[in-house]
Image: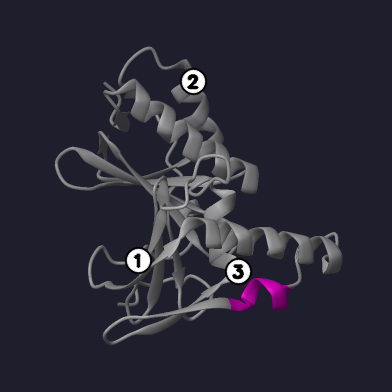
Amino acid sequence: MHERMLTVPDEAERKNLAGFIGHALRLDESAVIRMRRRGPDHVSVWAATGFDALATRTIVGTVNPDDTSAAGDTLLAALSHASGELIDPGFSMDSAWRGALPPAEGFEHLDDVPAHVLIELAQRGNALAQEHGSSSGPPVSLLDQEVLEVSGPSITAGISMRAIFALTAMGFVDVNRINETELVRVRASRSWIRLDARFGSIYRHRGGSIPLMVAR
């Protein structure tokens, strides 16, 4: 067995992982996927979104070593050709991963926002981006704009268009697959805000760009 190995026993989970990687590659054709063991039988997979936000989804499986990165295109190809639960992630891309991952704990629940509200905000943002954007993409002023403010017992945090664009671009909320009751949970720590949707989560550092070192 290869020293580096991702094990995903369930075919549906392999399809979930392939969908996650596919969305990440549409945002960045050279996307790097980070895989980190979470407990005895789960793996959290991470990708940068291009919106100064991180996307993550947790699948049932194991990875060796416990924290490693792989090229998204290589990993997706390995998944498409896998005949069973063992997936060779290819060469290590650990040196290509930029920025720290957020802490696993320390988040306060602020509010639950209807998913359709976030989709409507994304659609309005896309319309503005097409009207005022350029060949280099949406204007920074639009991306940085905080369009929702949510509060909890001790924290108030704003949700920027960057986080909402990342959420929809990764397919974590989908206009074709939601109902009026679907919610996105908003949590925050002193340093991070996270949006937990049905198909994955978005993390954005509250200081803007993702830090090189962990900030708790």
In the picture, measured across the screen, residue 207 lies left or right of residue 87, that is right
Residue 201 versus residue 124 in the image, above or below = above
Residue matched to label 2: 80
Residue at the image position 23 percent from the left and 73 percent from the top = 106
Left or right: 38 in relation to 155: left
Q: Which residue is mark 3?
A: 161
Residue 12: horizontal and vertical position, in percent?
Answer: 36, 25
Find out whether the residues at labels 3 and 2 contact each other: C-beta distance under 8 Å: no
Name the kind of residue labelled 2 in the image. Ser
Magenta-highlighted residues = 140-146
Name the one closer to the observer, 176 or 173.
176
Q: From the viewer's perspective, is residue 173 above or below residue 14? A: below
Q: Residues within 10 Å of mark 3 (few under 14, many from 20)?
A: many
Give the distance between the C-alpha atoms of the residues marked 1 and 2, in whole angstroms. Answer: 30 Å
Instruction: Give the structural element (helix, strand or loop) at label 3.
Output: helix
Instruction: Inspect the magenta stretch and tell me whether residue 159 lies in it.
Output: no
The dominant secondary structure in magenta is: helix
Where in the figure is residue 210, as x and y percent of width and height?
Answer: 48, 70
User: In this image, 140 relative to 177: left or right?
Assistant: right
Judging by the rendered image, the residue that carries numbered circle 1 is: 102
Quarter in which the C terminus is drawn: bottom left
First-in-chain label (3 vs 2): 2
